[in-house]
Image (cartoon, rainbow, N blue to C red):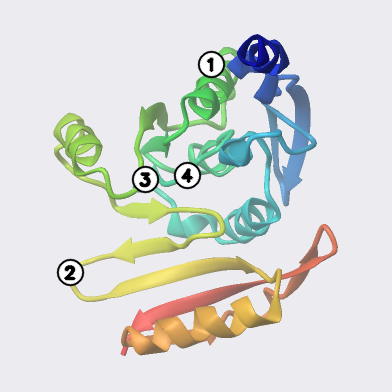
Amino acid sequence: MAREEEDDDVVCLDPSFFINDNYQLTRFTFGSQVLELYCLHSASTDFDLTGQLVWPGAELLNDYLSKNAEMLQGCSVIELGSGVGITGMLCSRFCSKVVMTDHNDEVLKILRRNIELHRSSQDSLCSAGLEAEKLEWGNSDQLNDILQRHPGGFDLVLGADIYILLCNPEKCKFILAYVSRAKVMDDMVIREAYQHGLHVSEVAGTRATVRFLQGVIYEITCR
């Protein structure tokens, strides 16, 4: 009898209960660049679906890229943690190829929807082919699959709230779009960089307030 009462108390929720897909078509402006895409305006109940939002770090990064578009001209790009694709969409206006990646299947759905929106808009400013691929950081099989499909590799690896990696035969440079959320984290980012043999310098004139948070662009190079 007690067992039956326990079973009566069990509530089974469909996985869709934790997923918010009430996306809204939203316009973003970065300098002279205007982008429209679908995204959420508030976080999902599932922490793993943070890619459904446009985060302050992405806005900071896009603002910087729009002002320094020459660094993107003709590049082939792969983006880590693309989310809804706002940074990749901007890059597609200057790059020769943009591959956007994310590890979450629900996020990949909205990313692909935004790619189709971008294509159907017949944006005359778009010069790059846009693709979406599944990539969980550290998953060598998924990474190798992507590299096999793109044997020429990529000129640029980028990520909002992560870093941009610029490589050529002579030097390697990271450009970090960083948004401060806690003083202890600010100190840790700089400290970790130095401990790994990197030099961190702030890009002049890039400090900005993004949604009431302080952001900055750092250039990080090997010492």
Q: Nearer the viewer, residue 119 or 146?
A: 146
Question: Mark 2 = which residue?
Answer: 169
Is residue 201 positioned above or below 54 on the image? below
Question: Mark 4 = which residue?
Answer: 81
Q: Can residue 121 be seen in this view?
A: no
Q: Nearer the viewer, mark 1 or mark 4?
A: 4
Residue drawn at x 44%, y 52% as measured from the top left: 72
Is residue 114 positioned above or below 185 on the image? above
Question: Mark 3 = which residue?
Answer: 77
Residue drawn at x 50%, y 21% as measured from the top left: 112
Name the amino acid type tagged 2. Pro
Tell me the number on the disc at residue 143: none
Question: Mark 1 = which residue?
Answer: 116
Q: Residues within 10 Å of mark 1 (few under 14, many from 20)?
A: few
Residue at the extreme front of the image, as rendered: 1
Give me the C-alpha separation between circle 4 and circle 3.
13 Å
Name the amino acid type tagged 3. Val
Q: Earlier in the sequence, mark 3 or mark 1?
A: 3
Q: Which of marks 3 and 2 is nearer the N terminus?
A: 3
